[in-house]
Amino acid sequence: MKKIYICRVIIKALAVPLITLFSLNKFNLFSTISAIPVDYQFEVGLTIYFSIFEAIAQIIEQLIDESRTTITFTFYKVPEEENIKSNPTIICSDDNNGVAYLSCHIALAGNIKKLRKAELCMTLPEWLSTQVDSNNKVLSKQDNTLIWKFTSLIPSSGTKYQKADCTQKIPFIRNEPDNSLNITLRPQMKMRGITFKSNEAIIQNKE
């Protein structure tokens, strides 16, 4: 369980009752209603006030969650093995003419403007290359750098909060026969205001 989530639960558990009691002691609306017996005015006020502040806290939590912008990038070999906590290894072996494939799943959530401006990049070493379909709307290649942009994936207008995802299958091509070469790759994002999470991919030249 994440530390941030635990802190949020504790803060909410302490704040809602304290605010409820403080507000109730300042002014109990139900003490002005003669239909409610005096002995029950505090109890009714406590129940109603607590419910109101609990609902307000949930609304605030939802607004905070929707204000966050996140991109999650996961490398995997087959869909059954997709796990951001696992780092897949592929081998550009002679059996496959020096080519190995790796898939990635990109999940986006948050502010439309931030997601449309977001850009991921991953530069390959000289001994490794790749090919990208010219019709690909998200992934492109410049020199030996893979670049992901999401302007075609995210609408230009509409709700401020948007979710989207895409999957790419990337071929990695060995340029050198030396079997001592291997590298750990991870895409990078420099834009502020976006939480980026990713696992790593380990690519070997030979077994």
Image: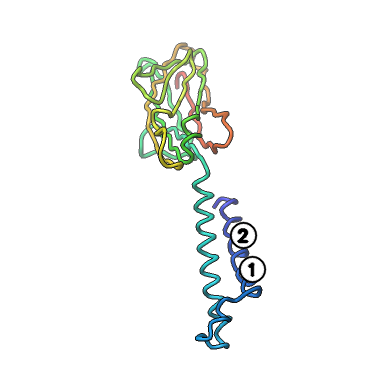
**Which amino acid type is marked by label 1?**
Leu
Dot placed on the residue nearer the N-terminal end, 2 or 1 = 2
Q: How many marks?
A: 2
**Which amino acid type is marked by label 2?**
Ile
Neighbor class of circle 2 (other Cα within 10 Å; few <14, some 14-19, many 20+) is: few
Residue 166 location, quadrant: top left
Neighbor class of circle 1 (other Cα within 10 Å; few <14, some 14-19, many 20+) is: few
Vertical comparison of 149 with 144: above or below = below
Which residue is painted at 57% across and 28% down in the image?
A: 190
The one nearer the camera, 27 or 80, is 27
Place of residue 82 in the rendered image (x, y in percent of width and height, measured from the top left):
41, 38
Vertical comparison of 136 with 198: above or below = above
Q: Are marks 2 and 1 in contact (CB under 8 Å)?
A: no
- Element type at mark 2: helix
Residue beneath label 1, please? Answer: 18
Residue 24 location, quadrant: bottom right
Label 2 vs label 1: CA separation?
11 Å
Specify whether 191 is left or right of 203: right
Q: Residue 112 has which mark? A: none
Residue beneath label 2, please? Answer: 11
Place of residue 141 in the rendered image (x, y in percent of width and height, measured from the top left):
44, 17
Which residue is painted at 53% across and 75% down in the image?
A: 47
In the rendered view of the protein, which quadrant contains the C terminus? Answer: top left
Place of residue 74 in the rendered image (x, y in percent of width and height, measured from the top left):
45, 35
Place of residue 2 in the rendered image (x, y in percent of width and height, measured from the top left):
56, 50
The one nearer the camera, 18 or 76, is 18
The one nearer the camera, 165 or 47, is 47
- Element type at mark 1: helix
Vertical comparison of 26 with 130: above or below = below
Which residue is painted at 57% across and 87% down in the image?
A: 38
2 or 1: mark nearer the eye: 1
Which residue is painted at 45% across and 42% down in the image?
A: 161
